[in-house]
Image (cartoon, rainbow, N blue to C red):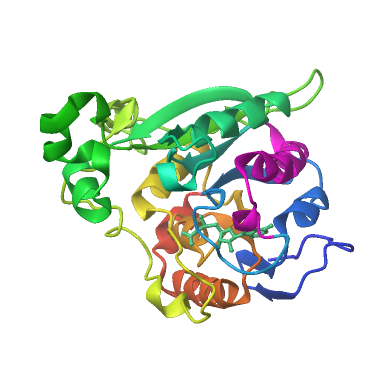
Amino acid sequence: MTPPDTPDTRVIDQAHGERFAAYCADCVPFTAALPPGSVDFSVYSPPFSSLYIYSESVADMGNCASDDEFFDQYRHLVRALFAATRPGRLTAIHVKDLVYYQNSSERGTAGLRPFSDGCTRIHLEEGWDLHSRITIWRDPVREMQKTKAHGLLWKTLRADSTFSRQGLPEYLLVFRRWAKDGEDVVPVTHTKESFPVEEWQDLASPVWNFGVQDLPETDVLNVKVARSDKDEKHLCPMPLNITRRALRLYSRPGETVFSPFMGIGSEGWTSLQEGRRFIGTELNPAYFRQAVKNLEDAATHGRTGDLFAAVG
Ligand SMILES: C[S@@+](CC[C@H](N)C(=O)[O-])C[C@H]1O[C@@H](n2cnc3c(N)ncnc32)[C@H](O)[C@@H]1O
């Protein structure tokens, strides 16, 4: 794929395939250097502020000391992506709310940090319109077993049920960059055959429930290989089934999909499998290297042939 002209983005490393371009770089200056309207659709998980530490870089948005600091940095990406997005098109972000505990809070209280609401606020302030909020169901029993969260334990309910809370879902928040007067809009069209009504009825649900068996870890690329440095605590890979649905709905085969936080390349892998082109940035060199392997794998073994034949 022809690399975008990115003169001043401090790209540390890069790799190109016929349908992908991957950059080890800070996504903010990189996105700001993308040609206006060059991204047909973007889909990604932002680093949930200070939940995970991905590297020691100051540009790593996972290293922010507070939500305010994270949103100050994230705003620059959201603004740059608005300019880089094709008029009339969308961006989709995979997020969830976060828990804070008594021992780590200034006031000595515990509760939920509405991280997803913060992401929405930043998008609205930077010119996007909220288009859809899809709730992704997650099993509360599994969350309880994994986190031992006080609010989910049955013994908490018996002792004082005012401390009981529901399990945390994930969200796919979708925002539109409306076209201005005079800007051309290219629709994403389908046929009865390519997108049957049953599939639409399924995807039109406000809650995407992949079932109890479909754990967040199951439909994801293998993360273990990328964990090489001691400071990389955890990477939460984007589930492939969520990306696949978003791509089907909001982009056409052959179009360019962008992930500013590509991690080990999940969004790119799905994009290539679904016959799209992909551009991704990732700051962490170990994740970047793994992403390139995954992208090369998807490009070689993807079921792209049939889909590509359908591109007009
Ligand atoms: C939630 S993870 C994304 C995981 C990815 N969706 C996947 O499935 O592999 C967020 C990623 O953002 C990266 N990151 C943090 N700050 C960044 C920045 N300024 N530019 C590019 N990548 C960044 C982190 O290293 C981490 O890999």
Residue 142 in view in this figure: yes
> In this view, which residue lies farthest toward the bottom?
228
Seen from the viewer's position, the closer of residues 36 and 162 is 162
State the residue at coordinates (47%, 43%): 94
Where residue 295 appears, as percent x and y from the top left, is 52, 70
Q: Quadrant of residue 96?
A: top left
Identified at 55% across, 72% down, the residue is 287
Which residue is drawn at the image coordinates 64% and 42% (left, top)? 40
Q: Position of residue 230 (x, y in %)?
A: 51, 79
Q: Residue furthest right?
A: 7
In the displayed structure image, the side of residue 203 where residue 275 appears, left or right: right
Give me the residue at 75% from left, 65% from top: 3
Quarter of the image where the N terminus is located: bottom right
In terms of depth relative to the viewer, which is nearer, 291 or 306?
291
Residue 127 visible: no
The percent position of residue 219, horizontal first and vertical second, equals 30, 58
Q: Which residues are magenta?
A: 60-88
Marks counted in the figure total 0
* Rendered position, 51 above or below 151: below
> Which of these two is toward me, 199 or 265?
265
Instruction: Point out the residue furthest to the top here.
Output: 181
64 is within the stretch colored magenta: yes
x then y, percent, for residue 185? 68, 28
Image quadrant in which you'd find residue 137: top left
Dominant secondary structure (helix, strand or loop) of the stretch shown in magenta: helix
Looking at the rendering, the quadrant in which ligand 1 lies is bottom right
Q: Is residue 50 magenta?
A: no
Left or right of 232: which side holds 191? left
> In the image, is residue 190 above or below residue 3?
above
Position of residue 154 relative to residue 312, above or below, is above
